[in-house]
Amino acid sequence: MIDAAGEQVDTYLTKEAAERDIERCKKEDQMYETAKQLVDSAIKAHMQMFEIDRETSRYWIRSASEVV
């Protein structure tokens, strides 16, 4: 199904199935926002700890996160 903005949207057999998917999406949005806040806090702490700029700190945090 295509919505008014021209984007494809899912269709569901029941209202309950649609509501479950909406709740799943909301939870994923919350997880993403929380993760962004945690990464931002880590970058800021790293910047202060080593007296470096945000770009450099972001590089090291991102590099380390790929190893964990």
Image: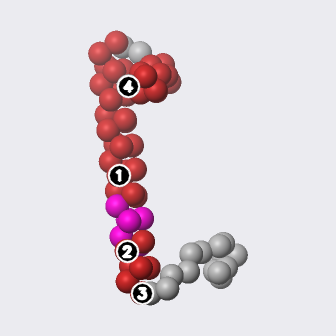
Residue found 37% across the figure and 74% down from its top: 20
Q: How is the image coloured?
A: secondary structure
Amino acid type of the residue tagged 2 in the rendering = Arg
Inter-mark Cα distance, 3 to 1: 24 Å
Q: Residues within 10 Å of mark 3 (few under 14, many from 20)?
A: few
Q: Residues within 10 Å of mark 4 (few under 14, many from 20)?
A: few
Give the residue at mark 4: 68
Give the residue at mark 2: 20
In the rendered image, residue 28, in percent from the top left (x then y), is placed at 39, 57
Give the residue at mark 3: 15
Give the residue at mark 1: 31
Q: Nearer the viewer, residue 36 or 21?
A: 21
Circles 3 and 1 in contact, beta carbons < 8 Å: no
The residue range painted magenta reads 22-27
Residue most toward the front?
13
Task: Identify the image quadrant of the N terminus.
Answer: bottom right
Q: Mark 3: which secondary structure? A: helix
Q: Residues within 10 Å of mark 2 (few under 14, many from 20)?
A: few
Q: Mark 2: which secondary structure? A: helix
Q: Main secondary structure of the magenta part?
A: helix
* Residue 39 higher or lower than 1, as above or below: above
Location of residue 24 by image quarter: bottom left
Amino acid type of the residue tagged 3 in the rendering = Lys
* Residue 56 higher or lower than 44, as above or below: above
Inter-mark Cα distance, 1 to 4: 19 Å
* Residue 13 higher or lower than 5, as above or below: below
